[in-house]
Image (cartoon, grey):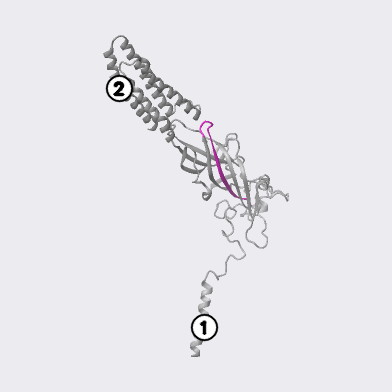
């Protein structure tokens, strides 16, 4: 009995030993005293973080930056590249919060958004206190900008901005391994090139071009931080809706020294909501042209009565043309709306000329000829008008 009891006790201890040994919650860590990758470093998954780049690791840091590191105690580094031997990879994120205005007259559009940059500068590494594996230092607004003025950073600009971007807030995060993350909230007015040939059934491409104004692509290479690229879905643009947003990295030629620069390009395709123009201008004008053809039924009426209908239509077209001129810039080509107004104007003018000619036939006692011309016009004018509109649609949309 004692043997059985002893066997059970030993078996219980053995089972408990196996449970403790195999359970991850009780197992000892192999990384004890080292860095726990990804647990404390939020940028570890990014290619530009110091945990992933190779410069500053393959050789002694002091010898690599012997001729570039500033000795001032108030400055972490210098404006010389963190990687004198090659490219500095910069992960870039851009989130558009709001697209506030699309202005065809000034060829501009306004945006608000967040920009996020991550890069590695081993010269910015510092010793961790209290035995922590990784820590961070955070600088805000003026302090962040003051440090950026003293160290190397991507020095980004929006290439197609009109008057510079308005930086509303800044944050600079420096991890103890030298990884740097720069964040800013900004608003800017950007230049666009609108193609208005199909107005008001047009779509436009709005581009946001971000590049470094200081470092060409042999020094700096952008990478997209997919997690922080996008736009908010809850904002609306007056008269427009967003069709798609695409982002890419490309190499562009500089204007002055012709060096190539790494550029982040976000393309926002917007489609005009044409319903206003369809129901407020196009449809009423088509009905007005149709009503003007009632003069062909006014047999024996005075010329003044017949001309009154045509004159009302012509004056309406002229007023619509003034409205469109205030909306659009002065372009050297005909838009779809211009062509539509011109065709309607031409048909109205022909209607008025037909009335004058019929009146002249009545004056010379050619009433039968006048009635015949009116009958032919009842068919010819609608056919001419709608065939012209159909041809116009084919020209612009095919």
Position of residue 295 in the picture relative to residue 63 (left or right): left
Q: Which range of residues does the magenta coloring cover?
A: 103-121
**Quarter containing the C terminus:** top left
204 to 301, vertically: above or below: below
Residue 159 visible in image: no
Where does residue 40 sit, x and y in percent of width and height?
59, 59
Q: Secondary structure at mark 2?
A: helix
Note whether 103 is above or below 348 in the view shown: below
Magenta run includes residue 118: yes
Depth order, front residue of 84/202: 202
**Is residue 174 in view?**
yes
Task: Give residue 10's mark.
Answer: 1
Residue marked by disc 2: 378
- Give the prevailing secondary structure in the magenta stretch: strand
Observer-nearest residue: 211 or 110? 110
Q: Is residue 39 magenta?
A: no
Dot 1 or dot 2, earlier in sequence: 1
Residue 25 occupies which quadrant of the picture? bottom right
Q: Nearer the viewer, mark 1 or mark 2?
A: 2
């Amino acid at each position: 009995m004692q043997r059985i009891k002893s066997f059970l006790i030993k078996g219980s201890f053995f089972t408990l030993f196996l449970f403790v040994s195999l359970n991850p919650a009780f197992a000892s860590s192999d990384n004890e005293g080292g860095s726990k990758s990804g647990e404390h470093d939020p940028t570890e998954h990014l290619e530009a973080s110091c945990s992933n780049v190779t410069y500053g690791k393959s050789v002694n840091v002091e010898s690599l930056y012997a001729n570039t590191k500033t000795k001032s105690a108030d400055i972490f580094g210098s404006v010389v590249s963190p990687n004198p031997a090659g490219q500095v990879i910069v992960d870039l994120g851009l989130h558009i919060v709001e697209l506030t205005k699309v202005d065809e007259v000034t060829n501009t559009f306004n945006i608000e958004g967040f920009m996020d940059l991550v890069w590695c500068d081993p010269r910015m590494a510092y010793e961790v206190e209290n035995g922590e594996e990784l820590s961070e230092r955070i600088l805000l607004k003026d302090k962040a900008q003051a440090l950026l003025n003293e160290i190397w950073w991507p020095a980004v600009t929006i290439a197609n901005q009109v008057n510079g971007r308005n930086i509303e807030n800044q944050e600079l995060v420096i991890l103890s391994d030298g990884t740097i993350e720069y964040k800013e909230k900004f608003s800017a007015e950007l230049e666009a090139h609108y193609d208005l040939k199909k107005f008001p059934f047009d779509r436009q491409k709005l581009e946001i071009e971000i590049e470094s104004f200081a470092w060409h692509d042999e020094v700096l290479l952008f990478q997209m931080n997919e997690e922080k690229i996008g736009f908010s879905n809850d904002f609306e643009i007056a008269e427009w809706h967003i069709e798609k947003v695409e982002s890419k990295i490309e190499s562009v030629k500089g204007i002055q020294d012709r060096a190539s620069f790494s550029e982040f390009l976000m393309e926002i395709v917007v489609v005009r909501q044409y319903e206003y123009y369809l129901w407020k201008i196009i449809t009423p004008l088509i009905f007005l042209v149709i009503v003007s053809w009632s003069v062909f039924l006014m047999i024996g009426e005075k010329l003044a009565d017949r001309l009154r209908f045509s004159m009302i239509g012509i004056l309406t077209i002229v007023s619509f043309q003034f409205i469109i001129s205030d909306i659009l810039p002065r372009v050297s080509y005909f838009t779809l709306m211009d062509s539509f107004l011109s065709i309607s104007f031409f048909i109205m003018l022909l209607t008025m000329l037909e009335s004058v000619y019929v009146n002249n036939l009545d004056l010379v006692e050619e009433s039968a000829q006048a009635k015949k011309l009116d009958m032919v016009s009842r068919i010819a004018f609608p056919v001419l008008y709608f065939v012209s509109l159909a041809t116009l649609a084919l020209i612009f949309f095919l």
